[in-house]
Image: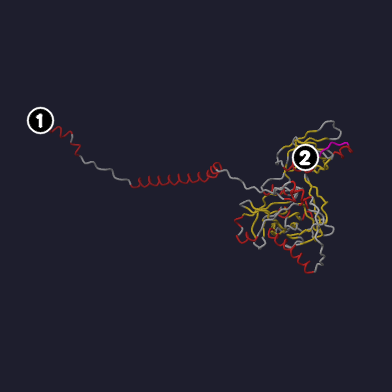
């Protein structure tokens, strides 16, 4: 038994052995710690990069951003201009248009004094001074080199009109020729504060452009001084109306000219559009720019250098603002102006019978290398349908063109002399740069 116990003790003697722990390898532990920290930093950096990259996409998907839209209502001639937008009954309108005869008060003749004339002048100029708060000076800085490769800068200046903002940028209407080759565009407000601007969009047909100025770059004092221009209805302008020129009628910034509308019958025809030109007896020259106001302080005409180069009597002319409103709205919202390249006239029913033509839109001229030219339209063709709709007036043609998008096709049906059937052509709208 004793021998058994002894053997048992020997067999389990290892239990009493003292287990010595393996020594810690500090270098190896340090390397593992650094690897762990490195992977953690790398994981965090990748996570941040992916978050920054995907956040705008996810945000746009969850909360689609609504682009700000500038809306400029189109003008119409009619009783709406007289009565406004309020609801008026037919009887009330008839009463205004055809009032009942009433006894007139006795006429008192009063001779105007010089002070009265000066008072009227002051009131007219006050309208111009207030409207000048919506005028800016646009400077286009052009960098170039001379014959000796010396770098120099030249500046061109003209007036611009503040037409509004879209929540993030101030929109300024001006002439494209001024900023066409500019390496830097500057806008100077009425308080003589100058900020940088950028070309947003322009129309190569009319020559007008929209500049954008970040609102955050404009100080609060300047924001309190400036104003937005009011675009009036130039379809109601008549010969003899008093006109006020603001901007730089004679090339001097923030000057004011007053006079009368002498003619409303002249037109300028460009590709796909016809614009009414107002002539005045206000002094002007080829450097004139700005706007023409009515007595309500509303802009009724746009003064542009491009349309003042051939002044026989050095008087100011302006383009009817109502006919430019759609273009201004499209440019303000970043849209390109579609272009077909046609100069047209309307063929009325009477003209059609006299000249054995189809009734529609007569093509006077097809601009070279235009989309219409490439599609095969010719001078002398008469457009009878556009996009499946019959077309009889020039304004209808112009509206159909503006409804297109560049690179969008439209089917145009024309009547061509010598052909028994109408010719169907597909025209791809373009843009005129």
The crowd level at tag 1 (other Cα within 10 Å; few <14, some 14-19, many 20+) is few
Secondary structure mainly formed by the magenta segment? loop
Residue at x-position 38% and y-position 46% = 33
Label 2 vs 1, first from the N-terminus = 1
Residue position for label 2: 372
Q: Does residue 209 appear in this view?
A: yes
Residue position for label 1: 1
State which quadrant residue 124 falls in. bottom right
Q: Which mark is residue 84?
A: none
Q: Is residue 202 left or right of residue 98?
A: left
State which quadrant residue 303 falls in. bottom right
User: Judging from the image, what secondary structure is the residue with disc 1 in?
Assistant: loop
Residue at x-position 48% and y-position 44% = 47
The image position of residue 112, as x and y in percent, is 81, 67
Residue at x-position 74% and y-position 60% = 248
The image position of residue 202, as x and y in percent, is 71, 49
Q: Does residue 77 appear in this view?
A: no
Residue at x-position 62% and y-position 48% = 68
- Magenta residues? 356-360
């Amino acid at each position: 038994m004793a021998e058994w116990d002894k053997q048992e003790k020997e067999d389990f003697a290892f239990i009493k052995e003292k287990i010595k722990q393996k020594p810690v390898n500090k270098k190896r532990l340090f390397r593992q710690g650094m690897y762990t920290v490195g992977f953690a930093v790398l994981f965090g950096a990748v996570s941040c990069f992916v978050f920054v990259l995907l956040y705008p996409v996810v945000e746009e998907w969850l909360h689609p951003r609504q682009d700000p839209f500038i809306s400029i209502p189109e003008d119409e001639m009619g009783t709406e201009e007289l009565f406004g937008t309020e609801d008026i009954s037919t009887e009330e309108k008839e009463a205004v248009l055809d009032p009942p005869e009433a006894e007139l008060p006795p006429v008192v003749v009063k001779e105007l004094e010089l002070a009265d004339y000066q008072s009227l002048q002051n009131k007219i100029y006050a309208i111009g001074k207030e409207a000048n708060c919506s005028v800016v000076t646009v400077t286009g800085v052009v960098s170039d080199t001379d014959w000796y490769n010396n770098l120099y800068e030249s500046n061109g200046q003209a007036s611009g009109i503040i037409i509004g903002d879209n929540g993030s940028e101030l929109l300024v209407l001006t002439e494209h020729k001024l900023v066409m080759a500019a390496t830097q565009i500057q806008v100077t407000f009425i308080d003589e504060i100058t900020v940088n601007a950028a070309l947003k969009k322009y129309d190569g047909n009319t020559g007008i452009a929209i500049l954008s100025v970040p609102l955050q770059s404009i100080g609060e004092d300047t924001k309190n001084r400036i104003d937005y221009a009011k675009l009036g209805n130039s379809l109601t302008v008549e010969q003899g109306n008093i006109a006020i020129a603001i901007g730089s009628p004679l090339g001097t910034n923030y000057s004011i000219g007053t006079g009368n509308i002498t003619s409303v019958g002249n037109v300028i025809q460009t590709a796909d559009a016809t614009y009414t030109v107002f002539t005045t007896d206000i002094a002007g020259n080829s450097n004139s720019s700005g706007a023409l106001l009515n007595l309500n302080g509303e802009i009724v005409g746009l003064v542009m250098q491009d349309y003042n180069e051939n002044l026989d009597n050095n008087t100011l002319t302006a383009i009817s603002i109502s006919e430019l409103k759609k273009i201004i709205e499209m440019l303000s919202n970043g849209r390109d102006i579609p272009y077909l390249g046609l100069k047209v006239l309307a063929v009325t029913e009477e003209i059609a019978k006299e000249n054995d033509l189809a009734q529609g839109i007569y093509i006077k001229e097809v601009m070279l290398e235009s989309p219409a030219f490439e599609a095969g339209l010719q001078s002398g063709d008469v457009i009878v349908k556009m996009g499946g709709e019959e077309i009889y007036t020039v304004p209808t043609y112009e509206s159909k063109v503006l409804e297109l998008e560049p690179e969008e096709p439209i089917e145009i049906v024309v009547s061509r002399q010598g052909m028994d059937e109408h010719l169907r052509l597909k025209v791809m709208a373009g843009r005129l740069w």
